Every structure is written in C-alpha cells, then in structure tokens.
Image: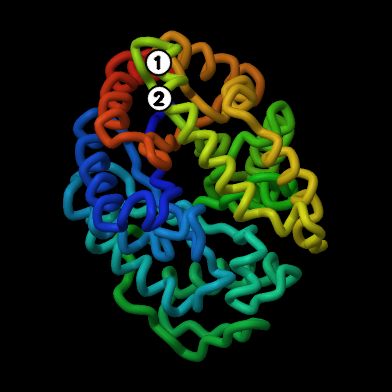
Amino acid sequence: MQFGLQFFPCVGPETKDARTYFRECLEIGEEAEHLGYTHARMVEHYFTFYGGYSPNPIVFLAALAARTKTMRLVTGAILPVFNHPLKMAGEIAMLDGISGGRLDVGVARAFLPHEFRRFRVPLDESYERFLEGLEQIELLLTRENVSHAGKFHVIENTTSMPRPTQNPRPKFYIAATLTPETFEFAGRMGHSLMAIPLGGTRMRELLDIYRKAWRDAGHPGRGEVMMAFHMFCHADADKALEIAGPPVAAYYDAITGATKDWTEGTSSNAYALYPQAMKMVAASTVQSQIESGGAWLGSPDGINRIIEDLVERVGPFEHASMQINFGELPFDEAQKSMRLFAREVMPKWAER
C-alpha cells in the first residue's frame, strides 16, 4: 500500500485566508515527498466552505510541481460537467509537461446540487455529460485533428496543444462513491478508481464489481484503487481525538450543509442513492467514522489496527489518500502527525 495526501479545503475567509491555506498546503506537500508520501491530490469544488477554495485543482498542482520532483500529482477530481473538454485537455497536457510527466487525472461526475444549480446544468444530465466529456478529453489527448459531435459539445478538426508528456496520456482515475454502474464502468474501461469508504462492508461489494469488470474486460492485473481518509496520528490516542476530533466533526458539518438539498427533497434518477446516503453522512460522528475506517485518528498502533480492520472488511487497495490538514487543525499539529505517521505506520505497510 502506498500513502499520499489529499488537500480538501474546508475553510473560509473567516477561518483562514486563501494565502495562508495554500502556503501551508504547499509546505506540507513539499515535506511529504521527502518523508516518502507518493502522491498529492486536490479536489474541484465551488462556492461554499466545503471545498470552495479549490475551483481549479490544476492551478494548485502546478504550484506543487515546482516544489517537488517525484510524487504523483493527482486531480481528485476534475469535473467535465462544468468545464469545456477543449479547455480541460489543454490544461491537463500543460500540467503534465510542467510536472515532467507526473500527472494522474481523476475525473468525477460531481454530486452537489447547489453547484449544478449555479452552473445551470440539470442534475439528470450529469452522467451523459461525464461520459461525453471523458471521451472527448481522451480523444484530444491521444489523437490529432479530432472531430467529435457530442450532445453537449462539438469538436471540429482540432489538435489540442500542448501534447501530453506521458504517452499516450496521463493515467485516468474515475471517482466513484455509491453508484455500482460507475465502479463497473471504471473497471471495464481499464481506468484506475478513486473511492470513499462510505458504505462500510458495501464498499467490498463495489470494489469487487470494479475488479471483476477489470478482469472480464481482459485488462492485465487487478486494477488500481485509491481510497480517501482523514488522518491524524499522535503518540497519545486520547490527545489525537482531543486535537483532531473537532475539525473532523466540522468537516462532516460542512458536507452536511453542502449536501442539504439531498436531504430536503432534491431527487434525480442520476443520483438515486444519494438522498438516503447523505442522511447517513449527516448522522455520522467522529467515533462512527473511526469505527467504519473513514477516519484514521489515534496512536500509530491504533491507526494500524484501523487500517487492518478496514482491509479485512473491504479488501486490499493500492493507495490511501489522506487529508491531514483538514479544517482548522493547527498547521504544526498536521506536520507532526504527518511525520509520525511516516515514521511509525508507513513502514508496516510498505510490502502489503
């Protein structure tokens, strides 16, 4: 198992200004590479406390590319539903060149109704827009003189510039949380997978769908899975909860606020499972997240047990993508946690 960092801003101007937030993230990312973390990942969200500091992850990853040499830089994930494929393909290839071919491209459908409403995109179009956007981006990255007549965007005899540094293109990750069809699609198409362990033992079923689709399509190996977690490591387990518990709770308050449309009557055939799932998220506590494996808070030994229990329940996965400077967690505490985890936890999983 490899370990990397996920930067998911859950702050606002009243709690931390953008200059401070990004300075801290870049310092953490630069040190993380020296400690053996293998990737850094940034989300795309808009407008609210929940993720709103990151409308374009490529901008942040370009800055981090200048301060690192080996770690993979991962969009986690970009959203074709709100962006033109011509623009996205050019930005992807530009960052691939700036980073020397270290970019991995995570792509997602988006799931926050308020973002769809503000961009004036119907929720029911999300899956069609995702599939079309992904297809057009891949064509633009892998071919020249591309023509493609989609339902939402038409491309006429266009060669996207610059061309990708990686041949034939950067690796694609597909973000999936609840929808079995998305797990199956990622496996069938031979893409890597980004997942969040919201479903507990159901995640095993969903990962099995992905692995089976991968094998059935004849792809070599068993696929590649990256899962996302909160992480705070402290020598004293009680102190870990005392320090990190409130910021994790604030994160779940923020996601509850950002997804309240789902629990207040919004529905879509494209997101049939989301209203009930978001009610479950709203009912989450820090302790329930620790027990489900979604939050790795504790001493090194305690976190090792959390990881062991999670792997036993959902099966092995290749990458853990960890939020370590979430919310208003003090910067120095995030640094100390990252260092202790690298020293005491990562070596135990290096060969597993």
| Picture residue at 63% right of the left edge, 44% below the top | 218
Q: Nearer the viewer, residue 99 or 280?
A: 280
Q: Quadrant of residue 279?
A: top right
Residue 260 horizontal side relative to residue 119, left or right:
right
Relative height, residue 329 to residue 63 (above, below): above
Q: Are marks 1 and 2 in contact (CB under 8 Å)?
A: yes
In the rendering, which numbered label is found on residue 205?
none
| Picture residue at 25% right of the left edge, 51% below the top | 20
In the rendering, which numbered label is found on residue 243?
2
Relative height, residue 283 to residue 258 (above, below): above
User: How many discs mark residues in the rendered view?
Assistant: 2
Residue annotated with mark 1: 239
Give the quadrant of the N terminus. Answer: top left
Relative height, residue 11 to residue 310 (above, below): below
Residue at the bottom extreme of this rendering: 156
| Picture residue at 75% right of the left edge, 51% below the top | 274
Relative height, residue 97 to residue 335 (above, below): below
Q: Amino acid at mark 1?
A: Lys
| Picture residue at 64% right of the left edge, 37% below the top | 211
Q: Quadrant of residue 195?
A: top right
Q: Quadrant of residue 128?
A: bottom right
Residue 196 horizontal side relative to residue 87, left or right:
right
Could you tell me which secondary element the residue under label 2 belongs to? Answer: helix
Image coordinates of residue 121 in percent, x first then y, are: 65, 76
**Badge 2 density bin: few <14, some 14–19, many ≥20, Cα 10 Å:** some
